[in-house]
Amino acid sequence: MNTSTKRIARFGLLTALALVLGLIDQAIPLTALLGGAVPGIKLGLANTVLLYAVYLMDWQSCVLLMLTKVVLSGFLFGSLTAILYSLSGGVLSLAVMLLVRRKPAAGALAAAVLALAADIWLLVQNPHPTGQRLWAVILIAAAFVASVVVYILIRKGIIRGVMGTSLAGAIAHNVGQVLMACVVLHAPQLLITYLPFLIGIGAAVGCLTGIVTERVLKVIDKGAFR
């Protein structure tokens, strides 16, 4: 099998995998499990495919994979509005991951700073949170701690940089979607009322996708980071 054929086959497999994981994402009622506190939230399992591509494919292939996944997922499982949200999140997420993949510790540090800022904002707005807001504060605080730990481990060379890139990409994806929602819904207040939740949750999910992707890379291509 020549190089061109291998690239086409890999692209097809990654596209199919992204669609399957996207369908699984749709089936997990994460919003309901969180009591409806953060509508539209997902685990972002399909992002593990794009994260894998960022490290093992050229940037043109990554862009094409992201666009293909967004368009096909939108037509198969969503709507035009869903495509707009996914596209805005996907473009910003991919751009950030491509930028920080050479310095992934910077991605983890940025995630920690944003998570801390989001937690402080929530506590300023409600100094004595209860119920769903309390759980949101706890989750974002956990995401902050995880981001700091990832930053330290990357700097010490104990873990590879996949998780730092994943953290930055996950948060950027949520930021992109909220920005698009502000435009579509004419609701700039979402940057204040909704974005802090998604920053913390994005950092938490980024850790998960980073762990999954790192394991996959070790199994599939142990020389990917050499």
Image (cartoon, rainbow, N blue to C red):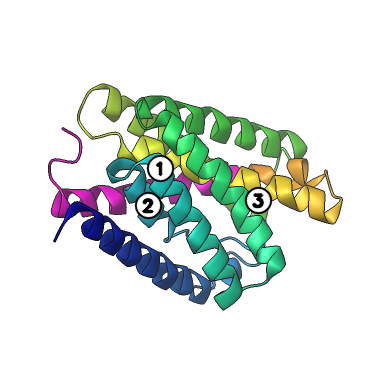
Cβ–Cβ below 8 Å for labels 1 and 2? yes
Q: Position of residue 141 (x, y in %)?
A: 51, 39
Q: Residue at x 36, y 43 (%)?
A: 54
Q: Is residue 74 left or right of residue 163?
A: right
Q: Is residue 64 left or right of residue 9?
A: right
Nearest to viewer (mark 3 / mark 2): 3
Provide the secondary structure element on which disc 2 rests: helix
Which disc is residue 166 wearing?
1
- Distance from label 3 to label 2 (Cα)? 18 Å
Q: Earlier in the sequence, mark 3 or mark 2?
A: 3
User: Where does the C terminus fall, quadrant-wise?
Assistant: top left
Q: Nearer the viewer, residue 212 or 112?
A: 212
Q: Which residue is mark 2?
A: 209
Q: Residue at x 39, y 49 (%)?
A: 61
User: Where does the N terminus fall, quadrant-wise?
Assistant: bottom left
Provide the secondary structure element on which disc 1 rests: helix
Q: Residue at x 69, y 39 (%)?
A: 122
Which disc is residue 177 wearing?
3
107 to 204, vertically: above or below: above
